[in-house]
Amino acid sequence: MRIELKREGGLAFIPGLNRPHVFKLGDLPPAQADAIARSVQAASFFERPARVGTASKGAADQTRYVLTIEDEGRRNTVQLLEPVEDPSLRALLDLLKQVERTAVRAAPQSR
Amino acid sequence: MILHPRWHRHSLHCVLPPYLLRSIAQNGSSAQRAAALRTSAVDNTFRSLRFVSNPLGQRSPGRVIAGMMAESQCYRSIYDVEGQETFPGKLVRSEGQGATGDAAVDEAYDGLGATYDLLWEVYGRNSIDDSGLRLNAHVHYGRNYDNAFWDGQRMVFGDGDGELFNRFTIAIDVIGHELSHGMTEDEGPLVYFRQAGALNESMSDVFGSLVKQRALNQTADKADWLIGAGLLASSIQGQALRSMKSPGTAYDDPVLGKDPQPGHMRDFVRTWEDNGGVHINSGIPNRAFFLVATQLGGYAWEKAGHIWYEALRDTRLRPDCGFARFARITLMAASRLYGEGGAEDTAVRDAWNQVGVPVTREKVAVAFTPPQGVQASKPSTRRPQA
């Protein structure tokens, strides 16, 4: 399973936090990979529409996540606008943000 | 002019002639200036400009004209979301209640109050919608959540992850920033895309910074002009999220990267990211405001703040407004408030020139008022240009 998570928006545009993060489940610790795989299934990710959540009139500085997952010939991209109200999608996003956080700190951007 | 505490004000609108109001607005004490400008809000000239040139009737039908109000009351409610991402959470502090000891709760409460006070005491604005909107903030949003946002109704603050960011209530200008989005939406709106979106962001930085400067009683030359000072964790190489004084210098860090803001049109960033660079190119109008404020000296929320506030309220500020149009509107606001050819007028013109936005007042006219039943104007199909 290949996952790409890209963060957009927020209170500031911060180059190091707005890069897409790509990772494969096989490269993660087994327990973390299993949790993500179960969460993808629980969230029915491949059946989700292209956009989840709608910005209210006048909203600003909200974070939007663009999440693409490929697995066994299937591929889906979903934009998630915070606050993500669906519990299963929120749980999946939380897991992926943990991976993203580790990756951001481990690989400072080259300048 | 006598000003009593917030919940018991008197106003002498109908007694003072316009020339005296103008004199007070220019030369009076801070409190006198605020009262005079509240009164000016119902002066015929200002009223005509705002309502005759607003054929689409964007304002709420039942709206109260701020200058006609004698009293205003701040109502704050702080909710603790307790690490969840659902609203409203638990109400933990309401208006008039004492400090809770929870830093995020108390900073949010104080920040809302400082923002409310700036708007009412300086600009005569009754809360962010000018109709007494109650102010709600939600703190402790999510886990390790690195953001604060305005969702159209409420302010939401994360605690930060402690590694990159501290709690987002730590910076009072960030609280003012989020609330000001509500004000811009009410007065504009300015669409959240490209130059109009950058102006929207800049407005929030301007008034957020003014909230902070007023809370600290700082004159323009003493202010740091940073947005989000204290927000970056100690391990980060940077001072803040943005610098209005020197855009592009707020941080330069191995993890965060380098602050991408330009301070001049020659460095304008064309991008599809960040809604067309709304948090990037806002550096240009931010620096223009800084230049006006420091050129005029004194407290930035006085003359410079009034000019920007009048510009925000000007109905010629279209939703797709670009930098050049906004610059002309600020120039006309300076002339209207302080007289044509004066120091204020010159400071505004010079500031925009210094950031690469040459400005003249000739190109902006009061909007055409069409016969009833005829659409006022078609949305602009031109790409906004500075």
Image (cartoon, coloured by chain):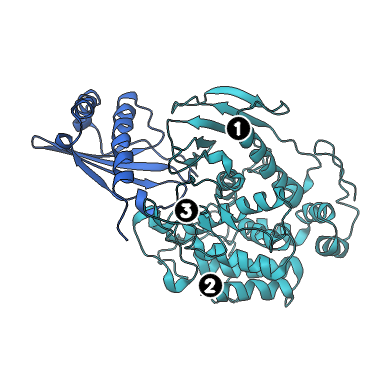
Chain colours: A blue, B cyan
Q: Is residue A40 left or right of residue B155?
A: left
Please tell me whether mark 3 or mark 1 is closer to you in this view.
1
Name the kind of residue labelled 2 in the image: Val
Instruction: Place residue B298 in its image quadrant.
Output: bottom right
Mark 2 lies on a secondary structure that is loop
Name the one closer to the observer, B250 or A88.
Answer: B250
C-alpha span from label 2 to label 3? 22 Å
- Determine whether B25 is above or below A97 in the image: below
> Which numbered tag is attached to residue B355?
2
Assess disc 3: are there few (<14), some (14-19) or many (≥20) residues with their C-alpha within 10 Å of its C-alpha: some
* Chain to which mark 2 belongs: B
Q: Position of residue B299 (x, y in %)?
A: 73, 59
* Horizontal side, residue B339 vs residue A47: left or right: right
Q: Label for residue B191?
A: 3
From the viewer's perspective, is A5 left or right of B268? left
Q: In the drawing, does residue A45 fall left or right of residue B303?
A: left
Q: Nearer the viewer, residue B46 or B251?
A: B251
Find residue B103 and name its label: 1
Of residues B269 and B315, which is closer to you in this image?
B269
Label whose residue precedes the other's in the sequence (3 or 1): 1
Disc 3 from disc 1: Cα separation = 34 Å
- Residue type, mark 1 in image: Ala
Instruction: Say whether disc 2 or disc 3 marks the residue closer to the N-terminus.
Output: 3
Camera-near label (2 vs 3) is 2
Distance, label 2 to label 1, CA atoms, is 39 Å
Q: Chain of mark 1?
A: B
